[in-house]
Image: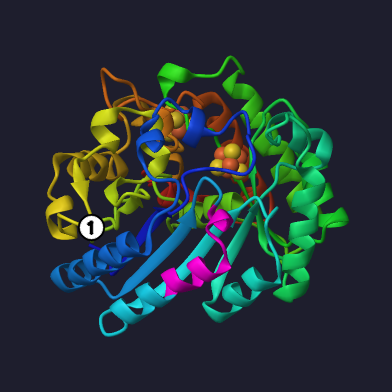
Amino acid sequence: MGNKITCVYKMVERCNINCTYCYFFYGGDESYKQHPPYASLETTQQFADFLKKGCQDLNLDTVCIGYHGGEPLMIGPQNLANMCEIFNSTLKDVAKVEYTLQTNAILVNQDFIEVFKKYNIGVGVSLDGPSIYNDIYRLNKQGKSTYEKTIIGLKKLSEGLEAMPGVLCVINPEVNSRRIFRHFVDDLGIKSMDFLLPHAPHKSQEPVSPELYGKFLCDLFDEWTKDDNPNIKIRFFKDALESFTGGYSSVYGRGVNDRTEDIPHLLNVSSNGDVGPVSELMTTSNDIMHTGFNVKTHSLYDLFKLPVFSQISQALSTVPDDCKTCCWHRVCGGGDLVTRYTDSKGFNNRSWICQGLFAFYARVASYMLNHGFCEKEMLKNLGIAVN
Ligand code: SF4
Ligand code: SF4
């Protein structure tokens, strides 16, 4: 087990807007309807106690709490501060505590900014590009644009935190990724961004062709490398380049993880304290997401003994059978975990976005080779035997 555990805390299971592509509300798992809208401080304390015991049992020294929703800012600044106090005070003797928070930024105000600063919370803002793209899916409850309000929140954050927060964009393969990049960099001054592939398994495969995902990624990669600006970071690309140079992706479930130590799992904790694998997998099957464990009544040690975590570990450390002969198998790993899933074969399928991923990794490799990266070294890093 690595020394760090990351937990996505769904401390608000409702949202102030209504994105039509939201996997949390519309991904097929409706358990949120049975959960309280807001996690209580009592549940948060039980969660902190669960982590404290888990750190002691498993020799963990760092805990990362990712505040997620729904929309986490609906909890209010004082409750957010109280939650951080609970984690800090409970874990102070056993682990370092880090915080992240993913928000649509609409509710950002000065009180929140003070809390972000006090507890050193790394804030990420969800935005899908200029309003013409963002407002395809990211709509308010009246079906209207959310773009302007998110931009106002983003500006408040950049002024209050004295640094522009990172932005997370869900990939819509039917729009122009170069235009999104130019908007982020030139119009908004964003320096750190990431792009999300759909959290969808084979069974809910979208009618959009996988090749379009490849085109989106290749165009974006070309635009990013054209600028050649080391201050602009795209996590997806940084990870890909790192994997080609023999490292590992920092994204859970992307690329092969053949490290000798155990893989640190990502956990999801619901507002009622239910705990299980990372919520991105909630579109796979109930058996995977719903462990029956709760932070009030179970331990982290016992949670990790559940077969579902062996199944996930096995999937993370191996490539699907169909990918074994693919030249990109080490960097791609068969695609993001959720996109490999089918009811009949679990994670032992190549991603339904395979063709797009193949094109993207080919583009990265060609860029590196054209810029002087040693071919022999690359083949070695890709796990391809060289004489
Ligand atoms: S802001 Fe996030 S949680 Fe809220 S509807 Fe949109 S995608 Fe879902
Ligand atoms: S590009 Fe396709 S075949 Fe190759 S590892 Fe990725 S999913 Fe598998």
Say which of 212 and 86 sits in front: 86
Say which of 360 and 75 sits in front: 75
Kind of residue at badge 1: Asp
Tell me which residue sits at (61%, 58%) in the image: 124
Our reading of the magenta stretch's main secondary structure is helix
Tell me which residue sits at (44%, 57%) in the image: 246
Colour mode?
rainbow
Residue 131, percent across and down? 82, 39
User: Is residue 99 at least partly visible in the picture?
Assistant: yes
Q: Is residue 302 left or right of residue 182?
A: left
Above or below, 22 against 42 in this view is above
Residue 188, percent across and down? 83, 57
Looking at the rendered image, the quarter that the N terminus falls into is bottom left
**Label 1 Cα crowd, 10 Å radius (few <14 / some 14-19 / many 20+):** few
Query: Which corner quadrant of the figure contains ligand 1?
Result: top right
Above or below, 333 against 153 in this view is above
Tell me which residue sits at (32%, 36%) in the image: 319
Say which of 205 and 75 sits in front: 75
Tell me which residue sits at (57%, 49%) in the image: 236
Residue 195, percent across and down? 62, 45
User: On the image, numbered disc 1 is attached to which residue?
Assistant: 262
Q: Is residue 311 left or right of residue 359?
A: left
Q: Is residue 240 left or right of residue 55?
A: right
Q: Which residues are magenta?
A: 72-84
Above or below, 10 against 171 in this view is below
Residue furthest to the bottom = 93
Is 240 magenta? The answer is no
Numbered disc 1: secondary structure = loop
Which quarter of the figure has residue 334?
A: top left
Above or below, 266 against 156 in this view is above
